[in-house]
Image (cartoon, helix red, strand yellow):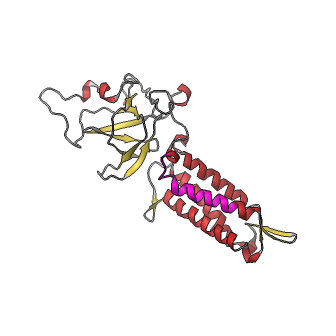
Amino acid sequence: MNNRSLTRGDLGVGIAAAVLLICSFLDLCKVENNSWNGWSSDFYPVLPSFFLSGVIGGGLILGARFLPDERKLLGMRLDQWGTVLAVSSAWAGLWVVIGNGPFGMDLAVGAILGFFAALVLAGLAVATPLVPALRLPLTGGAGAGQPGGQPFGGQPGYGYPGAQPGQPGQPGQPGQPYAAQQPAAQQPAAGQSAPAGGASDPNFQPFWFAVPAARPLYSEDGSQTPVAELAPGTWYLAVEQRGQALVAQTQDGRRGVLQDTSGIQRG
């Protein structure tokens, strides 16, 4: 499990789901000296529709980050299913609150705090793919704007360009831009022309690189659909060159085309 694939939004989703689970054990409603929590059999529909749907939704969103590829269920990714469950949890919690508790009983702290936790969970689940600040990784290599640094306080981590001689990603001279680091193997031989357009360079050698700012990674099929976002301070593996673009691989195994390679730094 690599926590560098988690984002700030994912952290918020995890915290909100944990709070929602805790709220299910607190008092949901009360009448005089009697009280019930979300696990009481008298209010069983509240448990799966309000509490468990949000907890499971948050788990699906986080779990999808650690899968090697984008697993789908009935045509939707697991994180998309998690977003649907998170929103439905907030919707169910709203009706518990505006209905003044099940069967008109007085609301207790579990219902009120649980509703706000479900609301935050749903908001983060929807906003994380859309807001760049929430898509930033929890941890990275160097600080923002310093992609040439070593990850985790100087210790090699995923994508650290310290490969052994003869292996892909063998370090060049860190800190120099990609254009100035083109190895001899990538230069066209005499009488040969450079690869055109999206053609792949047969002489390309994989290498590690970092981006100076957040940049989208587009689908390899040529569509303008982002499949991931590369963040500064993290090393990524370039596995193929297509004209001026690079095919890059992220920490969780996703691949896509980096169209803007200006200013990137080789490891």
Residue 77 visible at all: yes
Picture residue at 31% right of the left edge, 38% below the top: 240
Which of these two is toward me, 135 or 71? Answer: 135
Q: Is residue 5 left or right of residue 171?
A: right
Name the residue rendered at 66%, 54% in the picture.
18
Residue drawn at (28%, 33%) of the image: 204
User: What segment is highlighted magenta in the picture?
Assistant: 114-132
Q: Is residue 227 left or right of residue 223?
A: right
Residue at the farthest top position: 173
The image position of residue 179, as x and y in percent, is 30, 29
Q: Main secondary structure of the magenta part?
A: helix
Q: Name the residue at 55% across, 49% down.
A: 9
Q: Splitting the image into 4 quarters, where does residue 46 fall?
A: bottom right
In the image, 72 versus 9, the foreground residue is 9
Hey, which residue is sitting farthest right in the picture? 33
Residue 30's place in the image compared with 195, above or below, is below
